[in-house]
Amino acid sequence: MTTFAKAVREYEKLCEQHDVPQETVLAYLVELSQLERYNLYMHYDDEMPKDMEELFDAGMKRILNQEPMGHVLGYSWFYGYKMIVNEDVLIPRVETEELCAQVLMRMDHYFKDLDVIHTADIGTGSGAIAITVAKEEDKVDMIATDISVDALKTAKENALNNEAKISFMAGDMVKPLIEQGVKLDVLISNPPYIPQEEEMETSVVDFEPHVALFGGNDGLFFYRSIFEDCSKVLKDKAFMAFEMGWDQRERMSALVEEYLPNDTYEFVQDINGKDRMLFVYHNLEKWEK
Ligand code: SAM
Ligand code: GLN
């Protein structure tokens, strides 16, 4: 028998010892108890129901073992949408929500006169980007691709649960789009960009699919692939939006200038002030907000 307060305090202490962020305890309990944080505080000194205590103990045991909370719950939240996550997909990150917001603003700016905005999300994983952009902008016609057929299975389930209309294609980067003769106004991708040899946290490297993480020796393998092929799938006027590693700005600039010398581009920082997004403009004026 324990109270909410006591259980939280105990697990926060254990988190510290196991090198797990302490915020995880409350975040997990909020999901489990289905109470708003505010209500949870109101009940803080109440006894925890027995069945919840058992679930909480079992879940916290996995979390202390470095397993991501998303895997323990079986879902994760992205842009207010619930996404099933499992060992086949990357758990969508908060930084990627910013990419979606930046894409939506640019769609408004460049393409408000179009009836349909043909868009693709390359390497869709859980489907987080494709679903969010399709839900938030009615004019979007969305194609989502991935090389992992298992990831696509989860993405399809997420699209169905969130009532998002998306066409899915399996294959290597933009190759399936070329084969189908697709022409895009907007190409979005958060490809794997971690350099092969980089040391990473256990919760990521032991539990998330490596096909979603590693982008060759310098982490840039998949950007090269897209830059090489993009002219075959972009319309005359189009833009591309990428997530990138915070320390890749210089090498990304060099890459864009090498592969796409006639396009303009800009880097956008995330809320932590890190270079996190790259936008490439194809026959479009750079957007000066
Ligand atoms: N878009 C999701 C997100 O932002 O949360 C997942 C991004 S994850 C970093 C990269 C995704 O690219 C993974 O789902 C992985 O399976 C996929 N991928 C890896 N290699 C690929 C390839 N050659 N062609 C297409 N997709 C690939
Ligand atoms: N941001 C993810 C991480 O650091 C990696 C995502 C990616 O490679 N695109 O775990």
Image: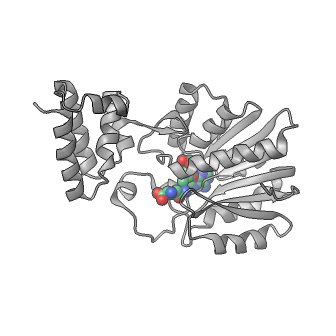
Number of numbered markers: 0
Q: How is the image coloured?
A: one colour
Q: Is residue 82 left or right of residue 184?
A: left
Q: Quadrant of residue 79?
A: top right
Vertical position of residue 177 compared to residue 213: above or below: above
> Is residue 256 visible from the viewing direction of this image?
yes
In this view, the residue farthest toward the front is 42
Residue 122 appears anywhere in the view: no
The one nearer the camera, 255 or 222, is 255
Q: Quadrant of residue 218?
A: bottom right
Question: Which residue does the image show at 32% across and 46% down from the upper left?
Answer: 24
Would residue 65 be found to the left or right of residue 175 on screen?
left
Q: Residue furthest left?
A: 1
Which residue shows up at 82% across the image and 34% down it?
A: 116
Q: Quadrant of the C terminus?
A: bottom right
Residue at 57% in and 46% down: 97
Q: 107 and 263: which one is in front?
A: 107
> In which quadrant of the rendered image does the N terminus lie?
top left
Give the percent coordinates (x, y) of residue 68.
Answer: 35, 47
Q: Nearer the viewer, residue 285 or 157?
A: 285
Closest to the observer: 20 or 118? Answer: 20
Name which residue lies at 82% across and 59% down.
286
Residue 46 image position (x, y, % from top left) = 18, 27
With respect to residue 163, does 275 lie above or below?
below
Up-down relation of residue 262 to residue 32 (above or below): below
Spot occupied by residue 247 in the image (x, y as percentages of width and height): 56, 70
